[in-house]
Every structure is written in structure tokens, then in C-alpha cells.
Image (cartoon, rainbow, N blue to C red):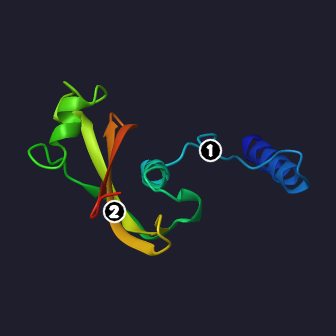
Amino acid sequence: MVTAVLVLVGAAVVAVAISTGALPPWRSSDTRPTAEQSAQDRCQAEVLKRLVSASTARLSDVRTEATSLDADGRDQFSLTLEESLKGVDRSRITVLNVSGVVNAPTEVGSTLQDHFDCRAYFVDGSLVHTLVLFEHDH
């Protein structure tokens, strides 16, 4: 009975402390972005770097989705040439694909609309490399 009363009093004290702001509610201290956020942020920055007028370009229909590693296809060069991926056991590598459309003014004043794919490579959960692929040359 005494234990139950002490627990009840303790809970009441904590509730009052939280409601008055003396004790903020518990929040996770892990504010790192998710893998999807990291991939999308890095890929969008990499896409814009490759444009003539990055400051006026607009990205739309941006999607991020998990995909498989294509070691014999479009991921082959990244796996063999990038130091961060060379020699890494493929089971440790995960890939997110960020895709979308970029609308950007060209040097002659017209607007270029182009689809892009960006492969974001993670090793043991850390983003180590991105590869941007456009449908057209830039």
C-alpha cells in the first residue's frame, strides 16, 4: 500500500513538472536525418551542381525508393572506380534511388525538362557516394 502511494505521488509530481515546463517531455536525442532524407538532400544538390543555371532550376516529382544493387549494370562503375565502394562486400551496400524531373533554363533561353535518377550508395547505413544519371547530356 505504501509503495502504491509513493508511486502515485511520484507520478503526480512528474506530471506537474511536465505541465509547468519545469521538466520537458522526453524526446529522442537522435535528430539525424533518415537514409531517405540524406539520399534526397545529397542527390538534389548533386543534380543542381550539374546545371548551367542551378539557381533558377526547379525540381519536381522527386521520389526516393529502395532498390537493388545492379553490380553488372548501372552500378558497375561506382563499385569499381569509387574508393568508398571498392572492395566492399556487396552485402554491406544498400542503394536508394532518387528520381524526378528538373526544369532548368538553358544557355539560349529555352527551358530544358529532363528526368533524372540518382543512385545513393550506403555502406553499413552511411551515405558514401551518389551517381546522377540524366536522360540527356548537360
Q: Earlier in the sequence, mark 2 or mark 1?
A: 1
How many numbered circles does the render carry?
A: 2
Q: Secondary structure at mark 2?
A: strand
Looking at the rendered image, the disc whose residue lies closer to the viewer, 2 or 1, is 2
Quadrant of the frame with the C terminus: bottom left
Amino acid type at circle 1 is Ser
Q: Which mark is residue 28?
A: 1
Give percent across and percent down for residue 136. Answer: 28, 63
Q: Is residue 110 left or right of residue 74?
A: right
Work out whether 109 lies above or below 82: below
From the image, tell me which residue sits under label 2. Answer: 116
Quarter of the figure with residue 137: bottom left
- Which residue sits at x=35%, y=69%? 114
- Which residue sits at x=46%, y=75%? 110
Amino acid type at circle 2 is Phe
Q: Secondary structure at mark 1?
A: loop
Quarter of the figure with residue 28: top right
Q: Is residue 15 left or right of residue 133?
A: right
